[in-house]
Amino acid sequence: MIAFEAMRFARHVHAGQERKYTGNPYADHLAEVAGIVATVIAADWDVPDEVAIATAWLHDCVEDQGVTGSELAYRFGSIVADGVFALSDLEQGRRAERKAASRERLAAAPGWVHTIKVADLISNTSSIVKHDPKFALVYLEEKRLLLDVLTKADPRLLEMARSQIGGAA
């Protein structure tokens, strides 16, 4: 039930938002990330499957839409809110400083959050490589560094993400 409600909420708060390069509804990306996560649900995760899937649906709502932690906690519980915040790039400063701080934040996150971030990376990479090859050079290096700290992610997704990044270079 929580995953369904997260999907409804995410589709509502991202309504009208489009993917940068394709113009597709942003909810398509959220659905892809949630779908990837749902395929690798792990018995050893510290959270129920639905919590991980709900967090995947909501992973960009703070960063992109300004949803507050208190609203997430009220609607979906503190575990989902904490997961979303662990996935939200809210750091300030120059790009290199922000990305380093993001890696540090994510390195400390639990494995189920690592898995969502890797699913997000998989969803984003092909579009960026296809539509913005110049930026892709920067993006791919940042993601290589990020994958180095996402050691608790599902190993199958890590392999897929590494292959995708390596093949795009």
Image: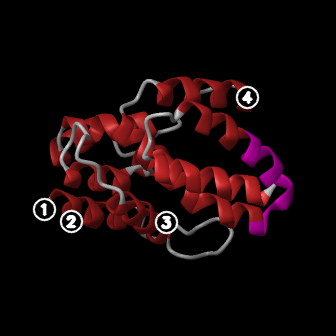
Q: Find the distance from the CA under tag 4 to the CA under tag 3.
A: 25 Å
Q: What numbered label is drawn on residue 50?
A: none
For residue 4, the mark is: 2
C-alpha gap between disc 3 and disc 2 = 16 Å
Q: Quadrant of the C terminus?
A: bottom right
**First of labels 3, 1 by sequence position:** 1
Q: Do the residues labelled 1 and 2 touch (CB within 8 Å)?
A: yes
Give the residue at x 17% y 41%: 77
In front here: 7 or 126? 126
How far is mark 3 from mark 1, CA to CA? 21 Å
Residue type at numbered disc 3: His
Give the residue number, with chain letter if any, for mark 1: 1
Is residue 97 left or right of 160 when viewed as pictured? right
**What is the quadrant of the N terminus in the image?**
bottom left
Write the start and end of the magenta stretch as one range.
130-141
Can residue 130 be seen?
yes
Q: Is mark 2 on a helix, strand or loop?
A: helix
Residue underneath mark 3? 29
Q: Can residue 64 be seen in this view?
A: no
Q: How crowded is mark 4: few (under 14 residues within 10 Å), some or many (20 or more)?
A: few
In percent of width and height, residue 142 lies at: 71, 39
Which label sits on residue 96?
Answer: 4
Disc 4 element: helix
Marks 4 and 1, Cα distance to the nearest angstrom?
39 Å
